[in-house]
């Protein structure tokens, strides 16, 4: 830990680079990482080699050989060990939270024997070495603590709340099921987007959505003026139970898609889509209501099922007319979550099948944290100055 010792390390590194050039970069990395890990162990123990100090927290216990795969080749490292406490060099916990969560999802499958040979190869490619249950357990404990802190953090005033769900394949009770990944995001008083939380459930039944919404309230979320979502029965029932007085905007994009299922002829589909689009783009609610009634009357004879569906459902997409005009475009749909779901799909596609709900939640949480950090430093999503 002395300057003299540090200087000798630098001299060794320089000598390696001078004599071996770029080809010696691998051995340089090995030297630097090995020295960095020893230094980190000394800081963890709070004592240098052979140093007697009252503040000492633990004792050195030799080294463990480890091969680390990098872009310059496989590095042969000496990982410092300690006798009593939990210590692992931070430089070996490479990658973002998302990368680590993906690795753990794959590793869990590999360890539990639920994976294919391909999964084992992916794990080895990402790690540079095979994994065992103790490796996975240790890494999970640390990462889960970080992710839980984010999922349980305190919330505040959220004006607009967006809700959506997607499905991932998860092994449950000896079978593979499609689990619902419930996601919430919102717009705060400063007009910034926030990813608020995630929950992995066996379905989108009302009890799962209700528990998820209640958890957001328990974390301090308040001030909602509008909820934007699709019309899933479980979600609608949960919204009514938890937020009975909050207005609801049904996603116009999904409304357009749902309407097509009631169009009796292929030749009518474009016409129906144009009429619904005109309703959604109306200048005000009065005009939207007028166009809606015209559509209901127009199809009453030649497409009675469509007419009935329009009468029962279309007005659920007109709630945005009660809100500032310059906000409406971003309140029409749940498109805010489309990019989020695309990114989740891109990452989870590698894992294909999760060994349990916890592994799925771990990876999705890490992805959401990554996106949330981008949103925090990005531009304002909505302007409330003229609201």
Image (tube, grey):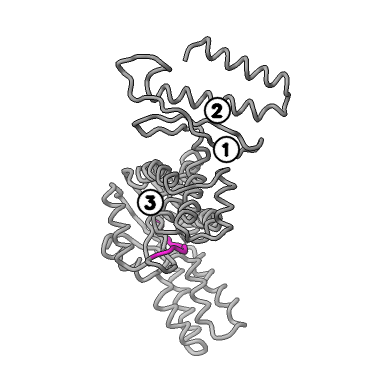
- Report the disc number at residue 197: 3
At which x and y percent is residue 234?
34, 69
- Cα distance between the residues tagged 2 and 1: 11 Å
Q: Is residue 143 left or right of residue 20?
A: left
Task: Tell me if label 2 and label 1 are in contact, CB under 8 Å.
Answer: yes
Q: Which residue is mark 2?
A: 33
Identify the mark nearer the N-term, 2 or 1: 2
**Mark 3 secondary-structure assignment:** strand
The residue shown at (48%, 24%) is 38
At which x and y percent is residue 4?
53, 9
Q: Main secondary structure of the magenta part?
A: strand
Which region of the structure is painted magenta? 159-172
Q: Is residue 284 above or below residue 263?
A: above
Q: Mark 1, residues whose alpha carbon is within 10 Å: few (<14), some, or many (≥20)?
A: some
Q: Which residue is mark 1?
A: 68
Q: Is residue 278 left or right of residue 198?
A: right
Q: Out of 273 and 19, give the one closest to the viewer.
A: 19
**Mark 2 secondary-structure assignment:** helix
At which x and y percent is residue 37?
49, 27
Task: Tell me if label 3 and label 1 are in contact, CB under 8 Å.
Answer: no
């Amino acid at each position: 830990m002395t300057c003299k010792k540090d200087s000798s390390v630098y001299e060794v590194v320089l000598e390696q680079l001078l004599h071996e050039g770029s080809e010696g970069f691998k051995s340089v990395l090995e030297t630097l990482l090995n020295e960095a890990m020893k230094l980190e162990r000394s800081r963890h123990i709070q004592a240098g080699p052979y140093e007697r100090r009252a503040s000492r927290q633990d004792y050195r216990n030799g080294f463990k050989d480890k091969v680390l795969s990098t872009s310059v080749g496989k590095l042969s490292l000496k990982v410092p060990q300690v006798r009593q406490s939990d210590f692992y060099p931070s430089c070996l916990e490479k990658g973002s939270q998302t990368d680590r969560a993906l690795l753990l999802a794959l590793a869990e499958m590999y360890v539990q024997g639920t994976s294919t040979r391909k999964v084992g190869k992916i794990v080895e490619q990402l790690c540079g070495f095979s994994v065992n249950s103790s490796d996975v357990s240790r890494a999970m404990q640390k990462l889960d603590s970080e992710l839980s802190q984010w999922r349980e953090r305190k919330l505040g005033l959220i004006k607009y709340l967006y809700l959506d769900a997607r499905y991932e394949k998860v092994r449950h009770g000896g079978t593979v099921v499609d689990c619902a990944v419930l996601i919430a995001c919102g717009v705060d008083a400063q007009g910034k987007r926030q990813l608020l939380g995630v929950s992995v459930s066996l379905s989108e039944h009302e009890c799962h959505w209700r528990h998820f919404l209640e958890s957001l309230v328990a974390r301090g979320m308040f001030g909602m003026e509008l909820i934007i979502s699709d019309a899933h029965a479980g979600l609608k029932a949960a919204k009514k139970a938890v937020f009975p007085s909050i207005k609801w905007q049904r996603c116009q994009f999904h409304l357009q898609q749902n309407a097509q299922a009631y169009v009796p002829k292929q030749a009518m589909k474009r016409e129906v889509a144009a009429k619904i689009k005109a309703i959604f783009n109306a200048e005000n609610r009065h005009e939207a209501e007028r166009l809606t009634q015209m559509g209901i009357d127009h199809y009453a004879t030649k497409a009675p099922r469509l007419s009935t569906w329009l009468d029962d459902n279309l007005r659920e997409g007109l709630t945005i007319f009660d809100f500032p005009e310059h906000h409406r475009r971003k309140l029409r749909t749940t498109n805010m979550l489309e990019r989020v779901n695309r990114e989740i799909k891109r990452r989870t596609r590698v894992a294909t099948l999760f060994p349990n709900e916890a592994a799925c939640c771990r990876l999705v949480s890490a992805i959401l944290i990554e996106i949330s950090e981008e949103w925090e430093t990005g531009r304002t999503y909505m302007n409330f100055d003229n609201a």
